[in-house]
Amino acid sequence: MDNKKIKKVLHIVGSLDESAGGPSRSVPQTCEQVSKLGLKIELISRPSDKPVKINTSKLFQVNFYSTINIFAYCMKLSKKEISLIHLQHVWDPYIHIVAFFARLKGIPYIITPRGMLEPWIMKQRSWKKKLGLFLYQKKDLKKAAVIHATCKLEETNVRNLGFTNPITIIPNGVDISKFPTEEPIKTDQPRKILFLSRIHPKKGIELLIEAWSQLTSDIRKDWVLEIVGNGDANYIKSLQEKIAKQQLEQQLFIKEPVFGEKKMTLFRESTLFVLPTYSENFGIVVAEALASFTPVITTTGTPWEELNTHKCGWWIDLSVENLRVTLQAAMQKSPEEMLLMGLNGRKLVEENYDVKVVAQNMLKLYHNILDK
């Protein structure tokens, strides 16, 4: 592929803050790896007090613009300088501004919905979603050269909304080179179960707390469950009250978010990772846990059926009873059995979700769009 034919690809994401979740990490990681393949990338986002650490280079630049400034920036967009625009999200007016000007300037663009068209999401404040579709989002999506889905399930959900654009499936990736290759020494006493994600009603945390409370004290006695992340203060308070009411404060803890090396250490010292979410287009934390040799329990609201097929975790229908039964089964496995599952998970990520492979597939997508 001749990258000289592509002048620059512009990526737009709403936030690169540490607290912003998966896209704030996966987007710059992918951009960095694509730039290492010889393509010039510019990543733009809103200003952030605590942006994630990003390795920029001559071919990969990051800029922060307010909503007013992104409007001014877009007025100067030129097809002579920008070959393609990649929009990372939907619903966000910040993203819509760029989509509008891309059409005005005749620059093709890709949209990655990032799970924001999933059925569970569409049901939340559905009147606002319908209004957003009517005012701008439907047109933004229909005019995209390609819609990028991160899994087959997301492709199906986009099709069910009536969009007929070409759809390309490329999963998110993790930078496997940042994860140690040696098997970790897991926490011995007590053994740790970890939830690490945004603390939000979408994540099914109330069901997890209820399932934990239904485990017998004999099963729970050598374990702790840590819920790590940030979220609405009132919602976190309601979870803490639920924990106190169930008298679980000695084993179940809600902790502040961690990042970088501290987060990786937490993944590696945990015996089990659990993400009981209602809906997730990918779930980058699942891949990060697997890269850390940690088996995973997650739900069929995610695309992680491979947990079952590769024997590195449990992919279950979300309910309190299913969580209770699965937690109990996992907690009764021997350290040797859990290690084997951890090795299987690490192998799965190395072979399918390394960000270097994702970057190569993304580069092919860009060429396919521009070669037409």
Image: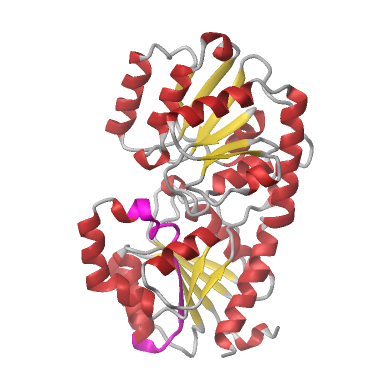
- In this rendering, position of residue 354 left or right of residue 235: right
Asked whether residue 150 appears in the rendered view, the answer is: no
Q: Quadrant of the N terminus?
A: bottom right
Residue 333: quadrant of the picture: top right
Rendered location of residue 358, percent (x, y): 64, 63
Q: Is residue 342 magenta?
A: no
Of the pair 94 and 276, the residue shown nearer to us:
276
In the rendered view, tell whether residue 56 sits above or below residue 317.
below
Asked whether residue 41 appears in the rendered view, the answer is: yes
Q: Residue at x 46, y 51 (%)?
A: 51
Q: Residue at x 52, y 9 (%)?
A: 217
In the rendered view, tell whether residue 146 sits above or below residue 90.
below
- In this rendering, position of residue 44 left or right of residue 123: right
Rendered location of residue 244, percent (x, y): 35, 15
- In this rendering, position of residue 96 left or right of residue 154: left
Of the pair 5 and 71, the residue shown nearer to us:
5
Q: Residue at x 55, y 83 (%)?
A: 369
Q: Which residues are magenta?
A: 104-121
